[in-house]
Each structure stands twice: as C-alpha cells, then as structure tokens.
C-alpha cells in the first residue's frame, strides 16, 4: 500500500461522485447513501462489507473491514483553508488575555500555521476509531502476549515504529495531516475540537479531567484519543506545502502527530484544542493512530 494517497493522480469513480462535496452528499437521501456503502464495499472486494447505519449527524456512508471489524467512514471531499487565519488567532489571543498571555498565545500559534493555504480534499475512507489494543494484537500476534488481555478493548497508544508495523500488517495508509484537520474542522464548519468554543482558558479544559467532546458531524470524537499520528513529515510552516490533502513527504515511520494530549501543566497547552493548532513532535513517544484508505 502506498504511504500517501494516490487518488489525486486519477479521476474519481463516477459511482462515488455524490461524495465530491458535503453539499453534494446532502442532496442524496438515506437510501442513496446506503447504496453508496454497498458500491464502495463491492469495489473494495471480499474483505469489506457495507454498513447499513449511516455515521454522524451528516449521515456518512461507511464500510466494515471484515478481518478486523474496523469501520471506515466515507469522508466527503471539498476545499478548506488550512492553518489559523487572523480571526482565529485573535480569538485565541482574547482567550489568553485575562491570564496576561495574549501575545505569548498569538506567537505560539502563528509560527507553525502560516502561510494559510487552500487545500483540495478528495473523498477518502477513514477509520472511525483509532487502533485498539485488541486490534493491535490481532495484526501483530508475534509481538504481543496473547494471554495478556488486560485493557484489550482500550485504544492503543503505540510508538511510531510500532504504528509502522501495524500499518504494514493492515495494508492501509496513515491519515494525512490535511485529512485529519478536514475531519477535525468538520469540513470547515467548526474551529475547536470541543463541542463549543471555550469561553475562557484554564487547566479545567484538560481532556484528562473529563472534557471529552461528543462526536462531531462526521461522527469523530477526536478528543478521546489525545495525540494522533499522521503520515506527514513535520515541517515548521506550510511554506511550499501541497495544495491537495496528501501526506507531505511521508515516511515509513511517522514522526508527526496532531491533536491534544492529556495531563497539562500549563494553560498554554489548551491551544491544542483548536482544530488548526499544531506543533512539532519529536522522539518515540506513544500516540494513537487511525488509518485511511483511498476510494477504489
């Protein structure tokens, strides 16, 4: 399986044109969306089955990868502006102003989220949930103790190297950073990973203290996992970044993650609850990982 999407090098299958944009999908009734699930599963082959249930408030089609029971949601395509625009940066600065840290917050989010870029997203399939401990053991039985089933249903936090091994066994690809942000922003409809934009910043926003967001319109609860590995190489800005949602200089062993983590020691870490915020990730720290697949 390629490290990055190959969908931008070929036309979209005419059967899947309702997924070209979210607006296009909204024009189709539930039965037509379920028919899309059937068509996608059939095109992918015998290892996949259609889901009768639609996902999220937007009612997205989905398929199941039968060997792992992984549910993959069909994410509509479109265009969005990646990075933090001036209004978003001003909003973050206002939240930190009562703490006397407005300038610090502005600088913190500006350095890695510029220049703004319009990104075109092709429809794709994304796992609704990150890999669980049980799924990791299924895919890599030689590295797990089969008798140790404690926490098997919990989400797995894996090192980048272990994530690469799981990807190889599964045969899918990592989620591109732009795809992650497209889902997090719900196709551009929201700014924060929280259910509502925060009215103030404090350590009480720490996900470890129970601030888990409900699923967004696409059916994804990104706060449930903390940091999530993505396929892109880390770059300190979006200078020369691709204009399509493809992993930027992907590596076999991922080195970059998006999202927020738990156990904050400083209010500045709440910035990571913004869907557009990012910062460098280094080392071999464990993180969650979910996988993606191109439409056939």
Image (cartoon, rainbow, N blue to C red):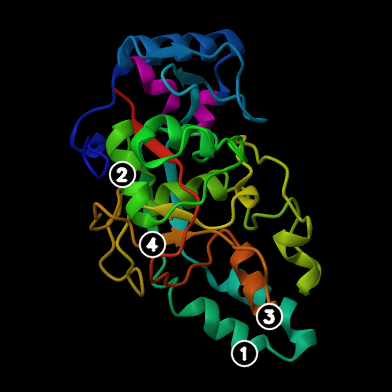
Number of other residues with Cα within 10 Å of mark 1, as a class: few under 14, some 14 to 19, many 20 or more: some
Q: Which residue is mark 3?
A: 266
Q: Nearer the viewer, mark 1 or mark 2?
A: 2
Judged from the image, the secondary structure of the residue bearing numbered disc 3 is loop
What span is colored magenta in the figure?
Answer: 15-25
Q: Is residue 15 above or below residue 116?
A: above
Inspect the magenta stretch and tell me whether residue 26 lies in it.
no
- Whether residues under marks 2 and 3 lie with C-beta atoms below 8 angstroms apart, the answer is no
Q: CA distance from mark 4 to mark 1?
A: 26 Å
User: Of residues 147 and 176, which is closer to you in this image?
Assistant: 147
Instruction: Give how far apart the Cα atoms at labels 1 and 2 are.
Output: 42 Å
Q: Is residue 180 visible?
A: yes
Distance CA(mark 4)–CA(mark 3): 22 Å
* Number of callouts: 4
Give the labeled residue for mark 2: 165
Residue that mark 1 sits on: 103
Question: N-terminal of the two: label 2 or label 3?
Answer: 2
User: Alpha carbon of mark 2 to alpha carbon of mark 4: how far?
Assistant: 16 Å
Task: Classify 10 Å Cα crowding around label 4: few (below 14), some (14-19), many (20 and above).
Answer: many
Is 22 contained in the magenta span?
yes
Q: Disc 3 and disc 1: Cα gap in Å?
A: 16 Å
Where 136 falls versus 164 (above or below)? above
Image coordinates of residue 39 in percent, x first then y, are: 39, 10
Task: Give the residue at mark 4.
Answer: 256
- Residue sticking out furthest to the left: 9
Give the label, 3 or 1, closer to the camera: 3
């Amino acid at each position: 399986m390629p490290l990055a999407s190959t969908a931008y090098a070929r036309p979209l299958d005419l059967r899947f044109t309702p997924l070209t944009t979210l607006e296009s999908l909204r024009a189709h009734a539930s039965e037509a969306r379920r028919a899309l699930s059937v068509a996608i599963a059939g095109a992918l082959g015998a290892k996949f089955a259609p889901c009768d249930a639609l996902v999220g408030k937007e009612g997205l089609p989905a398929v199941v990868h039968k060997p792992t029971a992984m549910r993959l949601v069909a994410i509509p395509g479109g265009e969005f502006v990646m990075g933090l625009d001036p209004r978003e940066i001003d909003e973050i600065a206002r939240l930190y102003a009562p703490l006397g840290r407005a300038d610090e917050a502005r600088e913190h989010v500006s350095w890695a989220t510029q220049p703004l870029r319009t990104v075109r997203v092709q429809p794709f399939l994304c796992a609704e949930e990150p890999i669980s401990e049980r799924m990791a053991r299924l895919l890599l039985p030689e590295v797990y103790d089969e008798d140790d089933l404690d926490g098997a249903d919990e989400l797995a936090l894996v090192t980048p190297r272990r994530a690469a091994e799981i990807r190889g066994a599964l045969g899918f690809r990592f989620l591109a950073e732009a795809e992650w942000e497209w889902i997090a922003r719900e196709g551009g409809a929201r700014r924060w990973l929280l259910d509502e934009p925060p009215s103030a910043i404090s350590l009480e926003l720490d996900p470890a203290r129970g601030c888990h967001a409900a699923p967004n319109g696409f059916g994804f609860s990104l706060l449930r996992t903390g940091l999530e590995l993505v396929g892109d190489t880390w770059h300190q800005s979006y200078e020369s970044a691709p204009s399509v949602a493809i992993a930027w200089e992907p590596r076999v062993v991922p080195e970059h993650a998006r999202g927020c983590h738990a156990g904050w020691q400083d209010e500045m870490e709440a910035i990571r609850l913004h869907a557009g915020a990012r910062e460098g990730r280094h080392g071999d720290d464990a993180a969650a990982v979910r996988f993606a697949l191109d439409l056939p």
